[in-house]
Image (tube, rainbow, N blue to C red):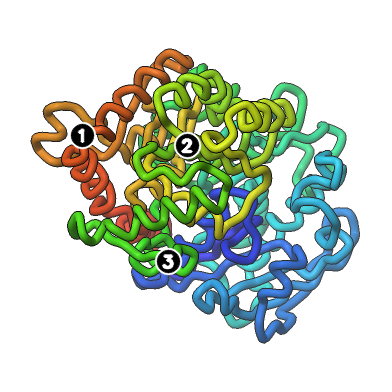
């Protein structure tokens, strides 16, 4: 089975969010499951620099007339994965983030940058590399969503099936209709049965419409996006794909080699779930973390943490409304993230109002995030919606008990602690339903009450840490899906 995975990021070379973690871990798990997998990536400087033994395998002409060279090599930092990288410095070698300039404005030619990725995928499925061609193309999120459309409009060649995975339906890759000429697709594709979305081009819709099979990153999210509330205007199309058996959810995993408190090089002390003694290192991690971020070193104070983009979607306004109450209940709060300027300012102000009890670190720091999960008692994910969520899984792995809203992958990975689940040893965290500060506050009070019952708390921690969260099951599900799509 020859698989080409297409994404804009891959951990640890380039990461702006959870997409990179999936793009880096899934192909390694697929390789272990017997799939001949290669990855295709845009030529961002970090990705070109990470490509070892790079050799050109071919060129193609973009719809707007540029000649693009495709390099093949391997990625030593990603398990030695075989990879293709687009050598196009004019499009990808820029300041700012991969998608925005230094002023956080999307680059005006993003449609060209990622259309190029889609056409490269189609060409690698149809002989650009004379030594290897893809039998299935798996595209991730809107940046790669044109790949299924390019495959569908490839003339005079056998059809190559595609899988399109939605990581977050809210980010759709919308562009003006007059830019259709730059995409290299027929004008007829700008229609309801194609890329057209309320008079504009939607890369996301291209993936949803043209892919042979659509997946999401959790079973619950696959159901939620078929509703008007979370369908982002695409729920009708999604219901249609589901009715044809062409939409489903496969729960993400985490890289258990990278996220392992027993061997994590970022932690000052190792620990595991085996026993109360084995968990002793977590208390030492907590003291070290409190000192590092400027919180009072207090073993008895429950330390709550969130590692997140600071956006409304992540439920941060709900958490902001609970900060004072948490401090009054003797808790500490640590926030790591960046995003909405108003939320950044509001959390910074609460930290100034509660020195030693609230700490805020703006930006993103991978090593610090590991130490936060290692040292915190609870991981907070009060999202308005959450396709899968990796943060709560990292919390589970590190004995940082999740407090989450019952949506998407959060609902699929966390079991609410109550008398029944404590009795049968399945409780792993605390969930709430309503998107409101009061509902979050109630869940936090339950969690804080459990924290003050050490035996119950240790049981919840250890149940979460023992939960199988690796990629093996997801990789097998994807491998089975690919085999169903490839003509025998």
**Mark toward the start of the polypeptide (3 vs 2):** 3
Q: Which mark, residue 387?
A: 2
Q: Residue at x 57, y 48 (%)?
A: 293
Q: Is residue 264 left or right of residue 147?
A: left
Q: Earlier in the sequence, mark 1 or mark 3?
A: 3
In which quadrant of the rendered view does residue 49 lie? bottom right
Observer-side mark, 1 or 3, equals 1
Q: CA distance from mark 1 to mark 3?
A: 28 Å
Going by the picture, which residue comes out furthest to the bottom? 53
Which x, y percent locates residue 83? 61, 73
Residue 5 falls in image quadrant: bottom right
**Residue 453: mark:** 1
In this picture, residue 213 sits left or right of residue 6: left
Give coordinates of residue 439: x percent, y percent: 40, 16
Marks 3/2: CA–CA distance: 27 Å
Please indicate whether residue 474 sits to the left or right of residue 275 in the image.
right
Callout 3 crowding tier (Cα within 10 Å): few <14, some 14–19, many ≥20: some
Left or right: 205 with respect to 480?
Answer: right
- Residue displayed at 79% across by 68% down: 60
Q: Which residue is identified by label 3?
A: 264
User: Is the C-beta separation of discs 1 and 3 under 8 Å?
Assistant: no
């Amino acid at each position: 089975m020859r698989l080409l995975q297409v994404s804009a990021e891959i951990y640890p070379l380039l990461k702006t969010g959870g997409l990179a973690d999936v793009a880096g871990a899934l192909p390694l798990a697929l390789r272990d499951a017997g799939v001949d997998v290669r990855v295709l990536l845009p030529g961002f400087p970090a990705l070109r620099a990470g490509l070892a033994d790079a050799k050109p395998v071919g060129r193609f002409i973009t719809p707007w007339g540029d000649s693009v060279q495709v390099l093949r090599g391997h990625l030593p930092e990603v398990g030695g994965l075989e990879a293709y990288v687009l050598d196009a410095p004019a499009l990808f070698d820029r300041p700012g983030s991969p998608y925005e300039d230094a002023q956080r404005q999307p680059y005006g030619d993003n449609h060209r940058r990622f259309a190029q990725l889609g056409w490269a995928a189609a060409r690698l499925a149809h002989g650009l590399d004379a030594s290897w061609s893809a039998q299935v193309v798996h595209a991730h999120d809107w940046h790669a969503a044109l790949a299924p459309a390019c495959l569908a409009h490839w003339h005079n060649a056998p059809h190559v099936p595609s899988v399109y995975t939605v990581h977050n339906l809210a980010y759709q890759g919308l562009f003006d209709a007059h830019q259709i000429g730059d995409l290299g697709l027929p004008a007829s594709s700008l229609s309801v049965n194609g890329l057209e979305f309320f008079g504009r081009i939607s890369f996301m819709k291209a993936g949803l419409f043209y892919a042979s099979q659509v997946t999401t990153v959790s079973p619950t999210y696959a159901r939620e996006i078929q509703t008007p509330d979370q369908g982002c205007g695409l729920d009708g199309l999604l219901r249609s794909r589901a009715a044809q058996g062409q939409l489903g959810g496969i729960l993400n995993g985490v890289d258990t080699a990278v996220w392992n408190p027993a061997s994590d090089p970022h932690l000052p002390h190792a620990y595991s779930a085996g026993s109360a003694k084995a968990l002793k290192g977590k208390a030492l991690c907590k003291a070290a973390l409190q000192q590092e971020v400027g919180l009072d070193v207090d073993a008895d104070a429950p330390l709550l943490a969130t590692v997140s983009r600071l956006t409304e979607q992540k439920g941060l306004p709900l958490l902001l409304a609970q900060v004072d109450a948490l401090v009054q209940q003797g808790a500490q709060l640590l926030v790591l993230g960046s995003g909405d300027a108003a939320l950044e300012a509001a959390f910074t102000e609460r930290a100034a109002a509660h020195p030693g009890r609230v700490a805020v670190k703006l930006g993103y720091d991978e090593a610090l995030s590991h130490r936060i999960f290692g040292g915190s008692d609870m991981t907070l994910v009060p999202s308005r919606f959450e396709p899968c969520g990796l943060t709560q899984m990292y919390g589970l792995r590190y004995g940082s008990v999740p407090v989450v809203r019952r949506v998407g992958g959060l609902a699929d990975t966390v079991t609410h602690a109550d008398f029944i689940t404590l009795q049968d040893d399945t409780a792993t965290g605390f969930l709430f339903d309503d998107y409101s500060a009061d509902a979050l506050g109630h869940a936090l009070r339950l969690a804080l009450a459990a924290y003050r019952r050490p035996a119950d708390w240790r049981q919840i921690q250890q149940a979460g840490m023992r939960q199988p969260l690796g990629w093996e099951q997801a990789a097998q599900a994807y491998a089975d899906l690919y085999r169903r799509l490839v003509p025998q």
